[in-house]
Amino acid sequence: MPMLNRREAAFGALAAGAFLAAPTRLLAAPAAPALRAMTGDVVPIGTAERLARIARVQRLMQRLGIGSILIEPGASLTYFTGVQWHRSERLTAAILPAEGEAVIVTPFFEEPSVRESLSIPAEVRAWQEDEDPLRLVAGALRDRKLAARPVGIEETVRFFAVDGLQRALPHTQIRNAAPVVRPCRMVKSAHELALMQKATDVTIAAYRYTWKRIELGMRPSDIAAIMNGATRALGGSPEFELILLGEAAAYPHGSGKPQQVREGEVVLMDCGCTVEGYQSDVSRSFVFGAPDAEQRKVWDQVHRGQQIAFAAARVGAPAGSVDDAVRRQYEAWGYGPRYRLPGLSHRTGHGIGLDGHEPVNLVHGETTLLAPGMCFSDEPGIYIPGKFGIRLEDCFHMTEQGPRWFSTPPPSIDRPFG
């Protein structure tokens, strides 16, 4: 389900511990001694693969006439350089030139820490506290004879960095780097797919451990703590956990009202983890106790919606056509129309990889053509305000033969974990 930078800033920091995404705020994890790590065979992304990524983006830059790209900390910086760093008021950034080695610009006192995760050959230029880091970036571009060529800006770079660069190089053309960065990151390698598969396997195993331990009266924070503990024991790094109970499940990002497990009410869990930075995203909905006829009907409709989306995801089809296929069926059942409630108020799916949400989305109007290696969530939920909601979410990746699941959707509301 949706994530906007650490799961939409923890979905507004939902009350009652329903969802805590930032690593320092994850709920205390109870021990899960029965579980063993599943990640002992994981191979991290290495230098050779990162250099191949840089070679690819450089070919695209040369084709589109871009001389360099500016990237701040985040998934794109990790993707190309291995650097795992945070954004602050002190600029750390990479310059990827169309030819030659990368340049890393970082505060002098942070340089040793930044170098720890740098996994490609690169020049490092450090700036002191009384210096303007964008002038250091400009100097590197001049030294590499790149200042006269367009500079591409990775699409998440903050305004102050773009503005500072323009001031330092007023005659340099600034361009959007999405046309060269997106084609690289959207199409995953076999290695990336294996890491995403492992993250999904961990999440599914953690779910199976957790749901058997859900008890009457539990709060979202109680369930989340079990899920986090299981995820860690299985070798994953918990990334987010959204637990919605009863009526709160009717609102895709939840409610701040107190919640607890009640007999005959929906439990909606939307959880994921990372393995070597690559993410999983799986949602399950079930009823604590026996489901009634309406709950069962809506669950079956969402299950059918997932299959419709999966069938519509074909190589060469526009990404938006997947959302359209689901919405046509939902409207035939009387939901909507379009994104109105009761019905499906959000897109059918989103891209996923190093970020929980990556371009592009399975949403009406998206014209990007599906291609092998692209990865998406499939989560056409149905939400009935004032009552309950059902969301089933499994991710898939595109192959030459069509989509392939990372996790298999569950068979029924009575067997929510297969």
Image (cartoon, grey):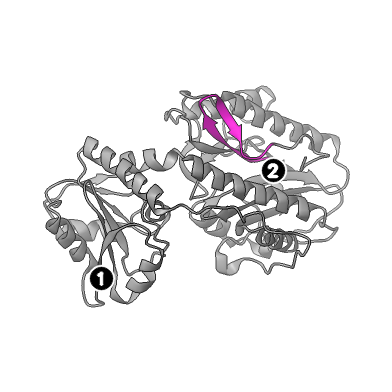
Secondary structure beneath dot 1 equals strand
Name which residue type carries label 2.
Answer: Pro
Q: Nearer the viewer, residue 317 or 221?
A: 317
Q: Quadrant of the N terminus?
A: top right
Q: Is residue 115 above or below residue 182?
A: below
Name which residue type carries label 1.
Answer: Ala
Residue 219 appears left or right of 185: right
| Residue 356 seen anywhere in this rendered image of the structure | yes
| Residue 270 seen anywhere in this rendered image of the structure | no
Residue ID at (32%, 64%) = 92
Q: Position of residue 58 (x, y in %)?
A: 27, 43
Disc 2 residue crowd, few under 14, some 14–19, many 20+, Cα 10 Å: some
Which quadrant of the figure has residue 250? top right
Residue ID at (31%, 66%) = 91
Secondary structure beneath dot 2 equals loop
Q: Position of residue 261 (x, y in %)?
A: 81, 56
Q: Which range of residues does the magenta coloring cover?
A: 392-408
Q: Position of residue 307 (x, y in %)?
A: 66, 28
Dot in front, 2 or 1: 1
Residue ID at (65%, 34%) = 343
Let me know if residue 280 is in the magenta part: no
User: What residue does disc 2 label?
Assistant: 385
Residue 318 appears left or right of 252: left
User: What residue does disc 1 label?
Assistant: 126
Q: Is residue 124 above or below residue 372?
A: below
